[in-house]
Structures are given as C-alpha cells and as structure tokens.
Amino acid sequence: MDRYCVFGNPIAHSKSPEIHAAFAAQTGQQLTYEKILAPLDGFAAAVQDFIAAGGKGANVTVPFKLEACKVAQALTVRAQAAGAVNTLHFSEQGIIGDNTDGAGLVADIVANAGVAITGKRVLLLGAGGAARGVVLPILEHRPAQLVIANRTVATAQALVEQFAALGGAGVVSACGFADAQGVFDIVINATSASLNADLPPVPASVFGPGTLALDMMYAKEPTIFMQFAENHGALVRDGLGMLVEQAAEAFAVWRGVHPQTAELLHAMRHRP
Ligand code: NDP
C-alpha cells in the first residue's frame, strides 16, 4: 500500500490520520497514513528516511513548514507565494513542495459556509505563516478589498508589497488592529492569539450582522475571538473546516481524486 504521513513536533494531537483514512475509504484508494514525530533538528533526515521506506507523500505541520520549502526540489506557485510548504509529493520529478492551507480556507468559506469572496471587503488579522498562505487564494477570488491588520504593521506592509504584483495592487492594504475601519464582510483571524486565549484588539465595529468571522484555530469550545465576533452580530466559524479542506486538497494532489468533505466535517463537528 502507498504510504503517507504527517511530520510535526509535537504531533500526537494531529487529526490528519483520521481525516485521510476517511478520504481513502470514501474514494476506494489503498493507502496508509501515519503520524511521524520528527526531531526538531532532524526534519530533512526524517523525510529522506520516509522516502527510502517507500513514502509517496507527506503533510508538514508546526514547526517544519518553512524547512519543508528547503527540502523540496521544486515549489508550486502557491507554495512559493506562501513561503511555506504543508504538502510534499514524492514524484518521479523529485520532491515537490505545495501549500494547500489557503485553498482549504477559501473552500471552507465559499463552499462550506456559502459566503462568496468576490467583490467583498475582507479583513485578515495576522501576517505570519498562516496569513501569508491565504493571501493568494483570497486574491484569486477578486475581493473588493483585502486589509491585512497585524500587531507588527511592518510585517503586514511587507505582505502588501509581496502581493502587489500577484493581483493585489490597489486591493491589498496594511494597518494596525486599531486602525481597521468600517464593517467587513469577512474577518479571518490568522493570528496565534487564540492559542493563548487572547484577542487581537480590533474595533467591534468591523463586525456587522452579515459578517462571517472565521478563526483559523479550532477547539472544543468557541475561541475568545469567536465569542467577541458573535457578541457583535457576526456569524462565526472555527478552523476545523479549513483543516479538513486543506487535507482534501492534499489528497487530490497525491491521488488525483478530490474527496467529499461535508459528511466527515459534520461527523467531526458533532462528535461528543
Ligand atoms: P505565526 O507564528 O507564523 O504568526 C503568528 C501571528 O499572530 C503573527 O501575525 C503575530 O503578530 C500574531 N500574534 C501572535 N500573538 C498575538 C497576540 N497576542 N495578539 C495579536 N497578534 C498576535 O503563526 P501561524 O501563522 O503559523 O499560525 C497562526 C494560527 O493559525 C495558529 O492559531 C494556527 O493554529 C492556525 N492555523 C490553522 C490551520 C488550520 O488548518 N485550521 C492551518 C495553519 C495555521 P506579530 O507579527 O506582531 O508577531
């Protein structure tokens, strides 16, 4: 059977094996998918060992997404734009690095939440790895405006400059959290603040009754960001849909078939 895995450190918490097992069963693909705890100083060696053992592809999670760019011998356009790799494909052409996080987020917003991005005002909170990975897929849907707000404004400004030539000119701008002006149609929390039960200090006025507020983090209980957004009238969503959709996209990269996600997402969301 073809072997796949997810590399991370830590990795015990990963839901990816369960997700890919469900996709394999659904599509009738014969494969195995395991978790591999790579040593912090041994990611590249762990990848080579897995290839030598017959591995066909791998997902990459914290803290190896940047290092995976270097391990890859070629990068897809979306991985280059993201500056990070979450999917490795071991092909006859060598190790191909891809990034499916942004496509996963956009699929969750457009297909699962049923919210169009085209023509909308979008506020992206954060300018780290996760934020950078979603800028190009969002721009491909031609929003009216994409404002990137970050604690360190210079990092957001650097993203604006990077994406100006990739469809972002006149559409993307940067600011600090407090300077986000007016109501947005979609607000995405791509900061890691939720991991510490913290809230990026955006004005409550960015949320309106029709706003979709999505936190990339997922947990059993709604995050503080989700609670804050809901209290100010927004519809809220966590990052579980993004997780399942980025996995579906990776599965399609490896196997050439895109699994259905609705049933699995529903089952994972409503598990006691
Ligand atoms: P990074 O460390 O690369 O970036 C962190 C970002 O959060 C930076 O913009 C940083 O600002 C900002 N930040 C950190 N702490 C605070 C705070 N207390 N208040 C305001 N801003 C803060 O992290 P990632 O981009 O890799 O990850 C971000 C989040 O996305 C994580 O919660 C992660 O779990 C989630 N994620 C979810 C995925 C999914 O499939 N659902 C996939 C990938 C990520 P500054 O620049 O000023 O330091």
Image (tube, grey):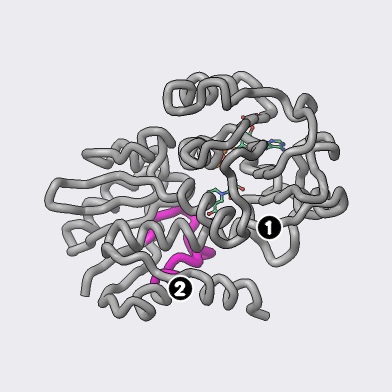
Q: Where is residue 154 in the image (x, y as percent from the top left)?
A: 61, 19
Q: Mark 1 points at which residue?
A: 237
Q: Where is residue 51, by image quadrant?
A: bottom left
What is the distance, in whole Å, between disc 1 and disc 2 at their CAs? 21 Å
Q: Which amino acid does label 1 sit on?
A: Arg
Q: Where is residue 55, by image quadrant?
A: bottom left
- Between tags 1 and 2, which lies in front? 1
At 30% from the left and 36% from the top, the residue drawn is: 70
Pick the residue in front: 246 or 136: 136
**Displayed-image quarter of ligand 1:** top right
Q: How many labels does the image show?
A: 2
Pick the residue in front: 143 or 46: 143
Region in magenta = 6-20
Q: Is residue 232 visible?
A: yes
Name the outermost residue toward the left: 92
Q: Name the residue under label 2.
A: 18
Pick the residue in front: 152 or 25: 25
Instruction: Say what secondary structure mark 1 lies in.
Output: strand
Residue 199 counted in the magenta span: no
Q: In this view, does 82 lie to the left or right of 265?
A: left
